[in-house]
Image (cartoon, grey):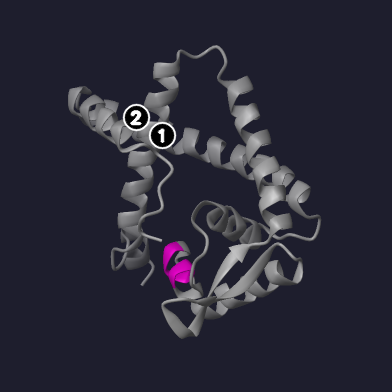
Amino acid sequence: MSGYTRVDPRLRAQGKRAMAEAPVLTGAGKDEAYHALEHELGVLLRRARALSTGMMREVHPDLDPGAYGLLVGLHGCAPARPSDLAEYFGVGKATMSRQLKVLEGLGLIERRPDPDDRRAHRFDLTTEGRCRMDAVSAARQQRFHQLLAAWPQEDVRVLATMLSRFNVLTENAAKAPRSRAADACG
């Protein structure tokens, strides 16, 4: 799972250069920027969840959000071991096992022997699962093209780069022992 990435490494480098050239905010301007970031991320996440729910229903009407997220991940990196998937998604093995069973029961994924370890198995999308995910992925791409049609391609690249950098930060933060909020709550 660690090799799974959707963003071209050249875009990550562009984002690092853009951040190095960005002005450093201090004082009230910095607080305002963080408040604006919090607000805009909240809006983005709510809208992304609504879009994802619609796409999820197109894949299968009985799919739940957790299983859909797993299916999206498998679409990009299958075949994968359950333990690797659990680590990547930051959930326990029991949770991962339940979600895999749901997807397997819907006929969207299948279990295959692991060629590297005869005791283990890997999961991959079935032909039907891949077909449905390819259709949803194409629809999502078309939606992005429609939404961003007026943007210069460079702006789309910068957005992808910045989101990639933010995702790396949040992935690293998720591995940190405790947050300030957790400390404050006891």
Q: Residue 33 has which mark?
A: 2
| Residue at position x 45%, y 13% in the image | 152
| Residue at position x 58%, y 53% in the image | 72
Name the foreground residue: 88 vs 19. Answer: 88
Q: Residue 183 has which mark?
A: none
Asked if residue 67 is positioned above or below residue 44 in the image, the reply reads: below
| Region of the chain picked out in magenta, as a range | 84-88
- Is residue 18 shown left or right of residue 135? left
Is label 2 in contact with label 1 (beta carbons under 8 Å)?
Answer: yes
Instruction: Name the spot of residue 145 as percent of width and height, x first.
Output: 59, 23
Asked if residue 124 is positioned above or below residue 52 in the image, the reply reads: below
Real-space CA distance between mark 2 and mark 1, rounded to the nearest whole angstrom: 6 Å
Asked if residue 50 is positioned above or below residue 23 in the image, the reply reads: below
Instruction: Name the spot of residue 141 as percent of width and height, x first.
Output: 60, 32
Q: Residues within 10 Å of mark 2 (few under 14, many from 20)?
A: few
Under circle 2, the secondary element is: helix
Q: Main secondary structure of the magenta part?
A: helix
Q: Which residue is mark 1?
A: 37
Mark 1 residue type: Leu
Q: Is residue 157 magenta?
A: no
| Residue at position x 65%, y 44% in the image | 134
Q: Residues within 10 Å of mark 1 (few under 14, many from 20)?
A: few
Name the foreground residue: 63 vs 120. Answer: 120
- In the rendered image, is residue 27 in sight? yes
Mark 2 residue type: Ala
Asked if residue 109 is positioned above or below residue 117 in the image, the reply reads: above
Quarter where residue 36 is shown:
top left
Under circle 1, the secondary element is: helix
